[in-house]
């Protein structure tokens, strides 16, 4: 088991005691579990902002659940992808802003450095980086002259960190794969997926859209050897069967798609996926969800998807609406539910433990209360059966 990690923020005098997620292992109260069981719960308040940043949200409209726009600073919200740093901290990708391209031009795309502290049920914010294009790798006009990327430029939904410290982000406006260095600077031109064109790209280029808006690379997995990325689309492409999602293989060395593709079939064509990560070279964990929240949330599941020819065969791992909670963590009852509209992050901590995070769509989603903006919740779940993870994928 990992040790408790002490993260000292240089120059701030802040000491964050971060309990290792893997320290919960597959035990609740010291015993092996017989069904998926909550072992950790932490929460980042909805109204958490990057201090000393820039105003944001000037064009956000609708029910803001008690918040007033514009915000004085950039919100730390919308967790749409996660990468484990192996030291008790995680790099978590913020979403594109306030729901669409038109109202998110003042939301700066950012990777947040976070650490859950389950002893106090809190999440420490340790810093982060903005995503930028200083070298002009993007050929079209950006929102800002300083080439800091915003939610009007891209909709980042998934992230994978490579061995060299650089990372790829899966976008939905292209959809594109975006390659950044460890400082958040774009290294290569955005890589499109042949035959898949989002409405946002169609509007810019005059091409015909083949995908629906916000249905691009919701999941991005990495092979155990780091050679390949696997981008899973959130929605079906024109001409494909309803609810059939494409998983495409990308060669990191060649920086191009290999042409290999598999199909993931949703339980219902109206459902969506929230994330997809690798378990080994042939298996993936996939979050599948309905569009409900609160009382209308019914299907929030994590499947193990295994390659079988050109398709992915699914086996249920966790029903996030029915997780055992014998210790009543977080102040919840013996049955814990995760009733959020969008659940977009899963990370494997060890063979029998996973962490799951929601995207709170700040300030709009109301999964916990019909009248209050959702917090970003961070949970760990012990599994009754080992995932037999390829050890190269564990930090």
Image (cartoon, grey):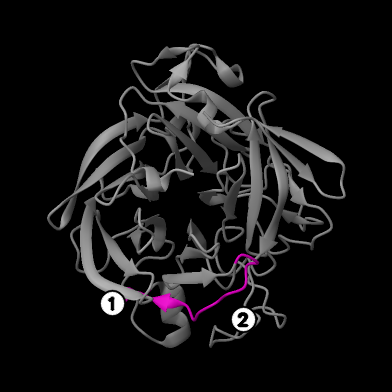
Given residues 316 and 88, the one toward you in this image is 88
> 383 above or below 167?
above
Whether residue 190 is in magenta: the answer is yes
Quadrant of residue 287 in the image? top left
Secondary structure at numbered mark 1? loop
In the picture, measured across the screen, residue 51 lies left or right of residue 124, that is right
Quote the CA–CA distance across marks 2 and 1: 24 Å
Instruction: Specify the label residue 195 is tagged with.
Output: 1
- Residue 197 screen position, x and y as percent: 36, 75
Residue at left offset 82%, top offset 56%: 72
Q: Residue at x 49, y 64 (%)?
A: 169
- Judge by depth and name the residue closer to the eye, 298 or 63: 298
Give how far across and how far down residue 11 sits, in percent. 87, 50
Compared to 29, does 131 lie above or below?
A: below
Is the stretch drawn in magenta largely helix, strand or loop? loop
Quarter residue 350 falls in:
top left
- Residue at image mark 2: 142
Q: Secondary structure at mark 2?
A: loop
Among all residues in the image, which is located at the extreme left? 309
Q: Residue at x 26, y 72 (%)?
A: 258
Q: Can you see residue 6?
A: yes
Q: Over which residues does the magenta segment extend?
A: 182-197
């Amino acid at each position: 088991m990992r040790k408790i990690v002490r993260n000292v923020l240089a120059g701030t005098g802040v000491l964050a005691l971060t309990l290792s997620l893997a320290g919960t292992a597959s035990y609740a109260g010291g015993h092996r579990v017989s069904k998926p069981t909550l072992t950790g719960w932490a929460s980042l308040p909805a109204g958490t902002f990057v201090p000393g940043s820039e105003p944001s949200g000037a064009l956000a409209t609708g029910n803001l659940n008690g918040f007033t726009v514009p915000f004085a600073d950039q919100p730390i919200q919308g967790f749409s992808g996660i990468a484990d740093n192996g030291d008790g901290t995680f790099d978590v990708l913020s979403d594109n802003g306030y729901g669409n391209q038109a109202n998110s031009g003042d939301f700066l795309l950012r990777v947040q450095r976070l650490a859950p502290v389950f002893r106090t049920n809190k999440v420490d914010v340790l810093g982060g980086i903005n995503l930028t294009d200083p070298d002009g790798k993007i050929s079209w006009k950006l929102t800002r002259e300083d080439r800091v990327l915003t939610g009007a430029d891209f909709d980042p939904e998934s992230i994978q960190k490579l061995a060299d410290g650089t990372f790829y982000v899966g976008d939905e406006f292209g959809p594109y794969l975006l390659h950044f260095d460890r400082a958040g600077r774009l290294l290569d031109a955005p890589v499109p997926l042949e035959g898949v064109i989002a409405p946002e790209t169609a509007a810019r280029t005059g091409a015909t859209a083949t995908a629906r808006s916000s249905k691009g690379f919701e999941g991005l997995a990495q092979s155990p050897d780091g050679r390949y990325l696997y981008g899973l689309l959130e929605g079906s492409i024109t001409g494909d069967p309803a609810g059939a999602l494409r998983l495409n293989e990308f060669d990191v060395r060649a920086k191009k798609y290999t042409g290999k593709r598999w199909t993931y079939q949703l339980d219902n064509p109206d459902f969506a996926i929230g994330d997809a990560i690798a378990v080994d070279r042939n298996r993936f964990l996939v979050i599948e969800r309905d569009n409900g929240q609160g009382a209308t949330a019914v299907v929030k599941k994590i499947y193990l998807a295994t390659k079988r020819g050109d398709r992915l065969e699914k086996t249920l791992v966790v029903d996030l609406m029915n997780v055992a909670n014998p210790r009543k963590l977080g102040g919840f009852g013996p049955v814990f539910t995760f009733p959020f509209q969008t659940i977009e992050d899963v990370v494997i901590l060890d063979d029998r433990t996973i962490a799951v995070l929601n995207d709170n769509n700040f300030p709009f989603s109301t999964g916990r209360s019909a009248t209050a903006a959702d917090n970003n919740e961070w949970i760990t779940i012990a599994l009754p059966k080992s995932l037999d993870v390829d050890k190269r994928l564990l930090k």
